[in-house]
Image: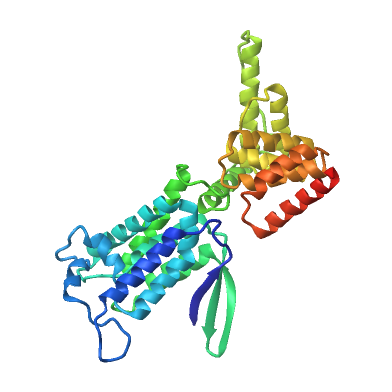
Amino acid sequence: MFLFPIRTSIAPRRTPYVNYALIVLNVVIFLLTLLPSGSGSGRADMFRPWLDQFILTPARPHLWQFISYAFLHGSILHIFGNMFFLYLFGNNVNDRLGHINYTCFYLAGAVFSGVGHMLMSDTPVLGASGAIAAVTGAYLVLFPQTMITVFYWLLFFMDTIEVPALYFILFKLIVWDNMLERHITNVAYDAHLSGYAFGVLATLLMVAAGLIESGGFDLWMMIKHWNRQRRYRDVVAGGYDPFTGWTPTRKIKVREVEKTDTAADQEVIGQLRGQIAARIAQRNLSAAARIYLELMQLDSSQILPRQYLLDIANQLAGENRHAEAAGAYEQFLAHYNTYEYADQVQLMLGIIYSRYLDKPDLAIKHLQAAVEKLADPAQLKMCRDELAKLQTKDE
């Protein structure tokens, strides 16, 4: 059975100039390395003699070889395959990381894959496969739930199928191609695996540390969601009833102490914040939203963590509590205006003000801010249509 990815379900929001530049640079260097060949085969079988010093040779490595080897290719098929995969997965990773970070990440992937190959083999190596494996690993972490359209050929049957990126990259590209099917002798499998390992682990650590903005659908969020479910199961196993909110209680002796009003309020605030975190961990967003509104009545200056606040705002909107949802969204934008998808929050807030709260001035303010940043065609059309209706009413 033959499987080959042909496209992904997402497009970059910004032009991935660095990824395009890397593809062009690789192709230009490949063309420069070719010597005229009388065979007419079109293969890069012969290289200029001085290129030997740029191939990574484990027996006598030089520092520059850990970068230079990744810009050399052995044949037209070799560079075509590498550049296609770099285009397929690199565009969105470039968009997410930014130009400078993506450049550093790509070169670091080349270095780590070269080191991995050198530790496991004494055969000279060339090609961008290791660096591209790192980029593909980053794609797995950042966009695991996107769909990859895969062309398959099984005997007399040919068609396409959509597969989640997490499963295709993990099981097909990493496990199957580089662990189970290691039958082609001139392929640097260890360099590929080292690149994948670097790409996955480095990106996961950067997202977890907040160095890369979490889009809410990445592998780190999936892990956190799994952990919330695990904690929920543990809480339920301990006697918690998710439908009534009751837990088994036991009597304890406490000593009465006098508290000032401020101290008492701070204790209540702490309890409410803890309850919100617990309800979100249990995915009981309705209860979390209710407690959030209690917290706002007590102290409207309290700010929840970004994802908590966004989840609660979305929950309030879903419950048609439009005024409360608008307040939560406004608070979110006031404190997390650098959020990657703040434009979508502004779109939601503009629609709430326009359709449900009859506040056209505020609606226009947020919709105009959103229309300048939205990249999704459907969302952009919705935003423009809503603005057009509001402007027509004003006239």
The structure residue drawn at horizontal position 26% and vertical position 83%, both measured from the top left corner, is 45
In screen coordinates, is 329 left or right of 76?
right
Q: Residue at the location (26% across, 66% down)?
A: 69
Q: How many marks?
A: 0
Q: How far across and how far down the image is residue 277, in percent?
A: 61, 35
Left or right of residue 18: residue 222: right
Quarter location, residue 331:
top right
Q: Quadrant of residue 29?
A: bottom left
As drawn, the residue found furthest toward the left would be 60
Is 5 above or below relative to 140? below
Q: Is residue 27 above or below residue 346?
A: below
User: Which residue is painted at 64% across and 23% down in the image?
Assistant: 269
Quarter placement of the C terminus: top right
Q: Residue furthest front?
A: 395
- Give percent across and percent down for residue 58: 19, 65
**Residue at the spot x=35%, y=77% of the render?**
78
Residue 140 in sight from this viewpoint: no
